[in-house]
Image (spheres, rainbow, N blue to C red):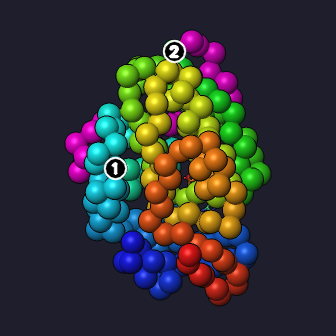
Amino acid sequence: MEILKERILKEGRALSKVILKVDSFLNHGVDARLMYEIGENFKEYFKNHGVTKIFTIESSGIAPTVMTAMQMELPMVILKKQTSKVLNNNVYQTTVHSFTKDLDYELTLSKDFINENDKVLIIDDFLANGEAALGAIRLVEEAGAKVVGLGIVIEKSFQPGRDLLNKKGYDVYSLARISRLDKGVIEFI
Ligand code: G4P
């Protein structure tokens, strides 16, 4: 997506070989117009995938997902990050490890918001190691539903997430694919 790539080049800052800061339009400040266009792009790609619900993971996945859900006229569900296990049997939970933040959390989905006939599109802001995406997939599949695709705003293709998901057979569609980062350097595939 050209306008996204231009924006990343203009405002993104590579803090190291692995971290890209995009606080001005995606992770802190949010450009709603850009999010709308991201929603259009995801809709165009996923419109024939039979999606019934769109899932995201709090918090930075919410803005692009709400725009996609609005345009696809589909329900949206936010997977919660709990710090500990919830002791009731109305939720699905799975432990996710974030390598970037070096912490674990319990990704949580209420059974009220999924059923076995659902075909789920998962949208997130970044794909790095794929741990969050794999956690979301585990929750959907534990409910007996199917993941029909993953929509990613910024993929760091030099990290393992994309290959891991592709090897497992998931359709990953990323709007910007970064091949290399270094201080002051941002390169796309
Ligand atoms: P993974 O899911 O692909 O394995 O990624 P990882 O756990 O390593 O990433 C953890 C968090 O860090 C996620 O945000 C992810 O979006 C974010 N992240 C990963 N790489 C980058 C990066 O290069 N730049 C930025 N800005 N964020 C990155 P989160 O913990 O879910 O936080 P939130 O912002 O969604 O609340």
- Residue 64 x, y percent position in the rendering: 38, 56
Q: Which residue is mark 1?
A: 46
Q: Residue at x 46, y 57 (%)?
A: 173
The type of residue carrying mark 2 is Asn
Q: Nearer the viewer, mark 1 or mark 2?
A: 1
What residue is disc 2 on? 90
Q: Nearer the viewer, residue 132 or 47?
A: 47
The reply to whether residue 35 is visible in this rendering is no
Q: Nearer the viewer, residue 57 or 166?
A: 166
In the rendered structure, which segment of residues is drawn in magenta?
A: 71-89
Residue 72 lies in the magenta-colored region: yes
- Point out the residue furthest to the top here: 89
Residue at left 65%, top 30%? 94
Above or below, 131 against 24 in this view is: above
Q: Decide: is 66 above or below 15.
A: above
Left or right: 168 as drawn, with respect to 175: right
Q: Are marks 1 and 2 in contact (CB under 8 Å)?
A: no
